[in-house]
């Protein structure tokens, strides 16, 4: 691990700020702050720092990912509802040149048909979905493995 | 009527700020301010206060609906163009736990094919559409009935 | 209001005669007679008389709407199952020249896929759906507004 | 040419601020600033001033186009990713009453299937696509011709 | 011509009783009675008698066609709205064993998409459409030719 | 067997009155009266009485099934052509609360594509199809088993 | 009838020159020359002259129809295989400004799926199909009626 | 009944060996052994012997059905999951020349969309579905009727 | 500019010879000769000669484009109706190795659905559409820029 | 072999005259003349003569195949781009009564989606595709086998 | 030809062991043993040995093709019903690295729609179909040509 | 960790035995044995034993999963090609009652369209895909977390 390397960017899409309060039968009771704490802890173990970002705005997420081209080493993203509708975030991800891992709390294939298609899946390295808050931790491990393949 | 209860949130989606100026043959000449006046008046009769909100931004509408979970009793929404494209507003509506009524000025079934599908319709209580500014007033009555079923 | 003007025609489609007895978890416990009473009362307030008609037969509904061209001022219709299958009622509605408002007790967008499409929606003035028996009362208000636009 | 007439509005959609840095094999190495310079120069020749606007936010683009109804004579727009997903920008364009020309750097018909459909194409006057930065210059000429048909 | 042979059955589907009154820009001003007169006259020239039948009810049309198996020599049918929705009339036509000609006043291919498909077309001998009241006369000639091929 | 219990309702849809006369290569030469005799005989063995009903009218079938809620114990139905087009009969079946078995003389999966879909299949208990008149007898056994599960 | 008026153009599409030799079980044994003779005879009765044209080439048919704008009064066309594939003939028909009647020897709705769609049907006045060589004669009568509506 | 005639082959597809243990709310608690006992008993009454076969392997089912061409008189098959995916079993059934009856424990039309289509339905004589273990017994009766039509 | 270089080929597809006469509300009143004059003039300014070719025949257009491989430097093509139906012209364009620009007078995205798809768009360099005769001039500029990228 | 029998017709569709020059990575470097030489040589071995025909015009290919009804014994055809768009060639093939073998140089299933469907495949005896120039030779062997089945 | 080189693997899919017995009107009376004899003879002429393999099991075919990576030079495969359903065989073919030729006895484009798509076609070198047993011989010649391109 | 608890079942679908040899640019050079070693090691750390199983046969995989109901605590499955085609494995998974995690080496959303749909995804707890051999390790961690939620 190198202390100088750039942090991993964690992006939480729309409505994830409601986590814990929102539909616990679907998303559990863990809050976003708790998820971020877990990510910081695991990242530390894996030798990485974390920048976290949540927004309900598609354009703001686009802008933050663009900045990542300079400021970050990789991207862990739960695009929330924008998974299914945002070509702009897809384009930002490509433009940033960042390796990205897409995560979902719930199993999107059990939900409405329009949630089965991800506009990001084929431009991300891979996907982890369905494990609640653990999806983020698994996704972080996956991303760390992609960024340090020899480790 | 109870003065203590929380106001009803009225959300106007993108381009509704142009009302009156915009395509009068489709939307009529009533302005949004006039619609809001009408809503305040009718709400008063029905024993409710009104919070109105208009934005062209999907993320801002998401955020305002999220706040409604604390600040409001119910939601009257004309999602405008986001009716057909926003999963994020759908998710915000579900997350807020608010009873919602969806209204449209025009008859969306007479317009382009992509306007026939609403991503909110099945998570709202019901829909009122096609009656111009009166759609809002009827929608408010409907919502008041849902919130005070015994009245 | 003019006492001489022709009554509004209210058409209830197939199986609505079973209301109250039928699937109360979907349609509530109000009977069709109670709905008609409510409509008569509200119509009186709004200055209108009401002709009500229920039939399980597509052809009979077609014939009654045709008669409406002479006998009625406007049409409030819950087409029931024929909403999704009857081009003949659509054609009768156009042929009658009557302004029509389409109402549904349940939120058809929450039900089977084949109930999402209405063959009448784009030839009606507008739709009100999802509010149980209140859908009829809101629809009547909407229709009265269409027939007396200056009121 | 008249010095008093309102400038042409040039709107660049999401991620176009990354131009030059972003995927040069697809979009070339010209930056957005260089494109804007080229547009200003050509506009001068053609007797027009230019207002340029870039945003990653759908709502902000909607708002800027709305303002164009008062402040601008016509619209040259590269909607980027919103080409394929934004009904709101379509509605803003219609509401603004501006003549619009849609341009794309790349040939969208050579790319992913979801990029083949433009939600703006049929409400714009026309399209120019596939010529890199030259698409903008050709689009500006086209728009100038539409605004000054007799020239 | 033989006076003993059974008459040709002419069936007019739903709403055709409104002809003349109904949408003259689509269907012209000729009434159904005038069409029937014209058919009787032409049939006489061609050596045939005519039985005419109009109903708004699908079941009644089915029953009348069934009777035709005994009472009639052939079938000239304008199924109106049932063209696009009635498998029952299709089955009656097959069961009756009658040679049938399908006619339409308007050009159904210029109208809504759901009017382009006929459930009868492939079980009829042929179709005549788009010539207003003349469609019936041409259809009668066609049917007479089918019934008396050597004439 | 209990003499007091309500009879089973047998509904034959449109054109089944033509049985025997109609397309023997598809439906065989047995008449509807013969089928009903067979059903009465088997029902007697199984301890049931039978009410039979045939109609070509969708609305009449709806009405008869509605009456079944009071008058009958279960429903054996060959909906004929309405299998594929009638939401109203589906709704009547649900509203009646009767256990229903759907039968077909022919194998509908060997016929035109539009005959492959049944609008009743998922609200019936089950289906028996393809065995000619025996489909009815097997369907009656199936229904008797459903009504008397312990037998 | 007026001797000065321009003749009616009759266009026979590809492979119709093979008529009589070709698939008699589908098209009968009448040759194209016999059909043309029949048309000349009937046209004479109806007060019209006939120009006939057959080609296997799409471009040649386009060119002949274009000439019809000057040389002919109306168009009777059996587009053969080009019915289903030629936008160019459709455009020629529109460009010519001629009233056109589309005819087919066979019932195209009984044949392969790709023969069910006509690219001309909605720009022709009407269609006559399924009556063999008689389709042409009926189509000529129909066209004469369109060209001389008062007769 | 003839003791010499070949037995009826009963094929149970994949996962049916789990019956009783598996999803009792969908499939009931009867085991496959109990179903086979019931079939043997009924077959005896009807004058037939039974060969039963269960496999989870598509190829093994294909092979057993092929053998049936020599060893069996008819086929009663519950293809389980292969109903929806196996063209090979369809081909084996055709190749065997056996009359087959398809049965299902559950009502496949109430389940996932991909279970609504059977690749065997149109090559079987008929189907019985939705009656739990009774589907097999009814199917056996149906098959016996097909094999001994005069009985 | 080099006088020796090969001319640019301009191909006008079917019915464009009717320009000016044909549907002026769609295509304007400019004739094809006038368009060609404008192209010659602009080409001269840009240092190019022009070969123009119009045909109603798909095969003739294919042959002329093939010749272009030897005789021309680039291709400006308005494929007219063949835009939507000709794989052969697509193949000729690829086989010729010419850089091509596709132009349309009208905005094809405002017209019938079958005009929205171009079989050439993804093998051309780019498209210009919707600007009437100016589409050709803009397309020529675009093509000149592609052929002389450093200019 | 019989010297008197009619030659086999070999038809090469549009752009095949460019072979060798055209996209060698897709089609190889063999010219059409070389393919024809190879066919003549193999045909001689197999006891047949060959008539070869290439055209870029759909109508010309139709006409040549029609002539084949008199002049040829069988048809070996590489329809090129018309494989996917020509109903007219399909009809000519049927009308000619010739046994036909369809060949393709490339594997059309590896190419664009619109090349996967052949409008001739089901009216040809069979297909050979993907083997470059050898597809023709194999196709000729296949056709010779069809024409002389006992050899 | 080299005696040392590895044999060609011939794989026959499910139900091909029934050949000769099975549906002679579709597949002819040749048995699989006779086809294999013919292949051995022709292979000898072409300088190859043959390994033949038939199985009704998808997994067994997968395993045999995998072994081919070591034991065989190329693959001639008639996948039978697995043509349309097996991604596993497709993957085995790719994994084996063998050049493969796909053959079919019948013309799959004349049969049920689900037989028109091959999951192997685009990963095989090419296809030969429709010539009965000769398809195998032609396919073997094609494969030998691919393996010895200079011969 | 408890030594007594049942091992986790790891199922590798068809062709995964070829790993390392097979398409290294898609699947990397790690062999299946190496993956199993890695799983055993990690499972040990997490307090679990592992049972591994690979088969090319759908039926064998079904059978092994069924046994898992008794012998295993959970299921880690890379269904390979059967992901997209096997309803039988889906049913086995449901019948077994095991919690399952689905993993893929490659990113299936970057590959052929038919690989985008998983028939298991909605009955598994979740998915991990795109990380090569690491997908298995992450999937095992995910499954361990599901089985021991409190750890």
Image (tube, coloured by chain):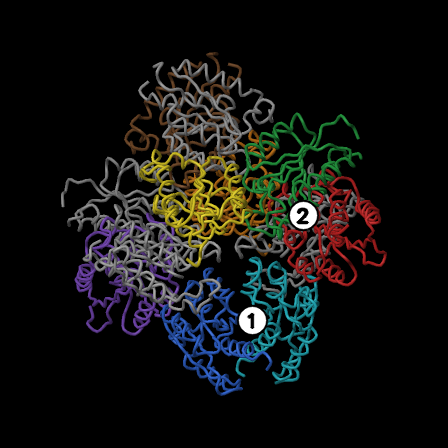
Chain colours: A blue, B purple, E brown, F orange, I yellow, J green, K red, L cyan
Please state which of the two labelled residues, at mark 2 or mark 1, is closer to the viewer: 2
**Depth check: A38 or L101 in front?**
A38
- Chain letter behind tag 2: J
Q: Name the residue under label 1.
A: L128
Label 2's element? Answer: loop
Question: Height in image: L138 above or below I17?
Answer: below
Question: Height in image: L21 above or below A137?
Answer: above
Q: Is residue F54 visible?
A: no
Residue at mark 2 to residue at mark 1: CA–CA distance? 42 Å
Q: Residue J132 carries which label?
A: 2
Q: Residue B103 occupies which quadrant of the picture?
A: bottom left
- Chain letter behind tag 1: L
Question: Height in image: L43 above or below K111?
Answer: below
Q: How would you rate the neighbour count of disc 1 (Cα within 10 Å): few for under 14, some for 14-19, many for 20 or more?
A: many
Q: Residue I138 carries which label?
A: none
Q: Is residue L129 visible?
A: yes
Which quadrant of the figure contains the C terminus of chain J?
A: top right
């Amino acid at each position: 691990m190198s202390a100088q390397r750039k942090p991993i960017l964690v992006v939480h899409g729309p409505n994830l700020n409601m986590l814990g309060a929102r539909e616990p039968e679907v998303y559990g009771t863990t809050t976003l702050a708790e998820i971020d704490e877990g990510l910081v802890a695991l990242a530390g173990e894996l030798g990485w720092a974390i920048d976290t970002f949540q927004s309900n705005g598609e354009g703001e997420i686009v802008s933050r990912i663009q900045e990542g081209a300079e400021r970050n080493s990789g991207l862990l993203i739960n695009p929330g509802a924008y998974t299914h509708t945002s070509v702009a975030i897809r384009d930002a991800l490509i433009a940033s040149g960042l390796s990205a891992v897409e995560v979902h709390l719930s199993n999107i294939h059990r939900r409405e048909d329009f949630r089965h298609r991800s506009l990001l899946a084929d431009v991300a390295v891979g996907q982890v979905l369905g494990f609640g808050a653990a999806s983020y931790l698994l996704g972080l491990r996956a991303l760390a493995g992609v960024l340090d393949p020899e480790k």
